[in-house]
Amino acid sequence: MALIVPDLPYPKNALEPHISAHTLEFHHGKHHKAYVDNGNKLLAGTGLENQEAEAIIKQVAGDASRIGIFNNVAQAWNHSFLWKCMKPNGGGRPTGAVAQKIDADFGSYEKFAEELKNAGVTQFGSGWAWLVLKDGKLSVMKTANADTPIAHGAKPLLTVDVWEHAYYLDYQNRRPDYLQTFIDHLINWDHVNSLL
Ligand code: MN
């Protein structure tokens, strides 16, 4: 199946005042769409075009001759995942299974929140911060540019985009403030629980 840009799971202004409709118009309507359009162009005729994005990512990861496919397909997948990681009136302490697993694997919610924020703040340049499940254990990781935990044998549970296009219109250079707001007001813990 060809890559697609899924509809946002909420109206474009639903995450205000934390993320503006203006940001989502560009982020979802322009940036995400460009990765999908470029990915579909690069996939055409390769024999990969009928596969799921996750399968394509695993096959082309680390192959320098197919870096363009990796970058665009991984960014298409990362963004489709990102929209589901946020919701209006989200964030704060989780409930359900993930709450217990965070306490078990990080020691406390506060420790998890600190690690996620720190991963996003210290990702030099463009990239992503993640909560992942690997070998039955939760951990935080960061990836550069299009890179994704899928290429590293880890299961993504949550992501926050730290490319400037994700926050610059609303937060300018204040990436730490954007990350704190994401943690306190935007995380969709229902989505995370559905993946555990
Ligand atoms: Mn983005």
Image: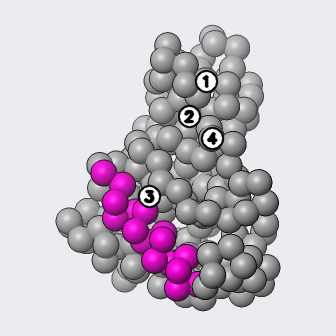
The residue tagged 1 is 60
Which residue type carries mark 1?
A: Val
Mark seen at residue 73: 2
Characterize the local packing of mark 2: few (<14), some (14-19) or many (20 or more) Cα atoms within 10 angstroms: many
Secondary element under disc 4, as helix, strand or loop, is helix
Q: Which of these two is toward me, 72 or 15?
A: 72
Q: CA distance from mark 2 to mark 4?
A: 15 Å
Q: Are marks 3 and 4 in contact (CB under 8 Å)?
A: no
Q: Position of residue 170 (x, y in %)?
A: 27, 71
Q: Please provide the residue range marked out in magenta.
A: 109-124
Q: CA distance from mark 2 to mark 3?
A: 16 Å
Is label 3 within 8 A of ligand 1 (CB to nearest ligand atom)? yes
The earlier-in-sequence mark between 2 and 1 is 1
Q: Position of residue 36 (x, y in %)?
A: 52, 37
Secondary element under disc 2, as helix, strand or loop, is helix
The residue tagged 3 is 161
Question: How many labels sit on residues?
Answer: 4
